[in-house]
Image (tube, rainbow, N blue to C red):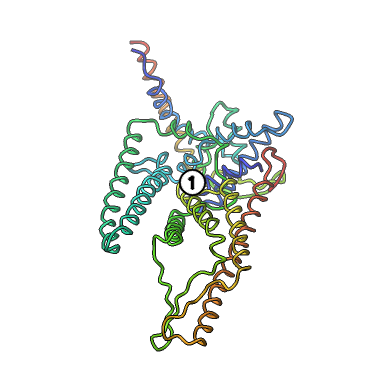
Amino acid sequence: MTDLVERYLASVQRRLPEATAKDITAELREALEGRLEAKAAELGRDPSTDEVAAVLKTFGAPAVVAARYEGRMHLIGPVLYPWFWPAQRTAVGVIVAILVVLSAIRALASDNPIQTVLQSLDNVLGWGLSVFAVVTLVFVLVERTGDPVKLAENCWDPKSLPREHIRKPRSMFESGISLFFDVLFILFWMRFIPFPNELPLRNDASVAITLSPAWSVVYWPILALAVLAAAGHLHDIVRPAWSRLRSAMSIVGYACGLGVLWVIFQGRPFADVQPQPGTSPEELERALRLVDGVFLVALGIAALVWAITLGVEVHRQIKAGRVPLTGVRTAM
Amino acid sequence: MPIAEDILEALRLELRRGTLILAVLGTLRAEQYGYSLKTRLSEAGVEIDEGALYPMLRRLESQGLLVSEWREEGKRQKRFYRLSDDGAGALEQLTAEWRAMNAALNSILQEGGRT
């Protein structure tokens, strides 16, 4: 089957109840194969991408087709319903993300960051509920005054369907958590957030840990990669489905990340430890070994995870490239 | 004042909705898979989008009026539908209903034409 058909089927499948999704999609696949074979016989050649798109267009928008199987009828009808939650997710997600960033900035400038964050939560909840209500109202108005089926059919283009058959769309929760930690890391890396760097030893003695000079060489690359990761996760919140561009962005990010790790590994030890009053040379040596070992394990795990993820993304790019853009005789 | 196109379209859809089910049940007295069913209906002058046909088949099956099975034909797995015993009974009753309604409607429409 062609790339467009796979994208179409995956888009329908995602919107169907899990129990029946595979069976329904299998039947739709069979129906599409029949239609495309008939089209190929009529043309005397494989249909072009535009011709495949035209066949898909007659089947109906994925959201509309899936809604007909569900037959859900509430305040928001079956045609608009599949758009309802993605719209809410995007609208509420964006407003909450903006307010969280503003709250973080306000908390940093405040004498009592925890109290400021707690006060901001009330604000976030209020705005989130207001945006939810406005979006719901817009959908109800469109449902009552517009022609949802015509609207849905006009608003979709088979050629712009995401490749959901390559990877399931990321959940907003997953992307939101990742974005939160990205922002936290950026603030820490830019020294807006102080990080406790004192390692207590026995008898009130302690050592202060600082990053070794190797890290300063890659300060800007690390910041750039963290910003790239945050931008990617923000993009995932708005467009959770897999795309070649987003995947390429991840590949570049992980490859550069591995390069940065390699530079850091060359400059071992990873950290310096400065003795505080009362710290013996043996304790200092032991602390240095401990800190270096912790960094080694953490960075080693990061390198392994990044390398595997990089491989997976490259595999997805190859898989996406293998599905033919046109043709009906090539089986998947 | 001429009737608005969208109102006419909505009325046409409403009128067709019930008759499509009857057409599908009638065609499925002989076993068909989705694409062949659509072709048969089309040849008989009944047009239906696949996007509407397949959910309808599933609904009729869940109501016990159709039975289906996946089978290989022409090197492809296809889902074949046919009327169940209950479906055959329902078709018989609906056909009688349709004929009675058709006769009544003809009578009403002809009377309307005479006045």
Q: Is residue A83 above or below residue A283?
A: above
Residue A324 seen anywhere in this rendered image of the structure? yes
Q: Residue at x 40, y 71 (%)?
A: A196
Q: Position of residue A35 (x, y in %)?
A: 63, 35
Residue B76 sits above or below residue B16 on the image: below
Of the pair A262 and B113, the residue shown nearer to us: A262
Closer to us: A270 or A261: A270
Label 1: state its secondary structure: loop
Which residue is pictured at 45% across the width and 38% down the height?
A: B93
Q: Nearer the viewer, residue A154 or B90?
A: A154
* Left/right of residue A44 with respect to residue A93 in the rendered view: right
Q: Residues within 10 Å of mark 1 (few under 14, many from 20)?
A: some
Looking at this view, name the residue that lies furthest to the front.
Answer: A277
Query: Left of A42 or right of it: where is B106?
Result: left
Residue corresponding to mark 1: A239
Question: Which quarter of the image is occupied by the N terminus of chain A?
Answer: top right
